[in-house]
Amino acid sequence: MTKVLLEVQGLNRRFGGLTAVSDVSFAVQQGEIFGIIGPNGAGKSTLFNVIAGHLKPSAGKVRFDDHDISGHASDEISRRGIGRTFQSVHVFAKQTVAENLRRAEILARRHNPFAYLARRALSSQADVADVASFVGLTGYLDNEAGGLAYGLQKILGVGMAMMAEPRLLLMDEPAAGLNPSEKRAMGALIRKLREQRGITVLLVEHDMPLVMSSCDRILVINQGKPIALGTPAAVKADPSVIDAYLGEDYEFA
């Protein structure tokens, strides 16, 4: 039986009188690529920030690897093996690609040196050259990160997250701002994370071709509430999803 790695139970998040996330529940299996989609303002980013520890839940629970992490600080959640990439690029622009990856590794050691070293002893060596090769940045190691094309900077962000050897990677709109060829490359990298490194991926994304080609299951939320959960084929045929988000004329090109 496949292990549940992340479980969200009845999650709510309120900001004063506004409820941004309302009674959201789902479970992500180990090794799964799980997508979250919905209209702008649906509550996707709030949900992500609660899971990552940047916001505390108003109610409900988040469990990771059978441990309750509800309301824990982001650095503690990172120590447990949850990494994150961001919608906008987060690189050290004046440092080289190699220095960015090395700095990410140092931060991982600082956050949890004992767990980090234990993970390293049991896994392949996630050093700079290894990760750069995996994400396709070997030829750019001596380049300043700020001088890279935007798409390569987003790829570097994935590489930096990998330096901590996460078991679960939260990816916030990885295709945002990318051109069609860069989006295809990002989709291939997401699938490669799972297939070659065994990393479970939780993905928030608006690019439907990437979502439909990469995700095993998809949760759709609207106005903070879940309206559908299932395989890509089931979700894109769901009348409530078509009505709330995709529209009747939407085509998955």
Image (spheres, rainbow, N blue to C red):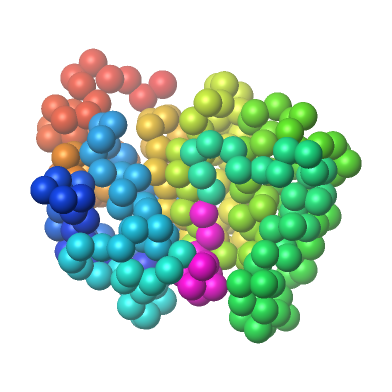
Q: Which residue is drawn at 18% across and 39% down?
A: 222
Q: Residue furthest top?
A: 249
Q: Quadrant of the N terminus?
A: bottom left
Closer to the camera in the image, 217 or 20: 20
Dividing the picture into quadrants, the one containing residue 43 is: top left
- Residue located at (19% from left, 58% from top): 12
Highlighted magenta segment, given as a residue range:
75-84
Q: Nearer the viewer, residue 131 or 40?
A: 40
Asked if residue 79 lies in the magenta stretch, the reply is: yes
For the C terminus, which image quadrant?
Answer: top left
Q: Is residue 196 visible?
A: no
> Residue drawn at (26%, 63%), measured in percent from left and top?
57
Please give left or right for residue 49 compared with residue 15 in the image: right
Q: Is residue 194 visible?
A: yes
Up-down: is 29 above or below 180? below
Vertical position of residue 151 compared to residue 86: above or below: above
Tell me the residue at 20%/50% (across/down): 15
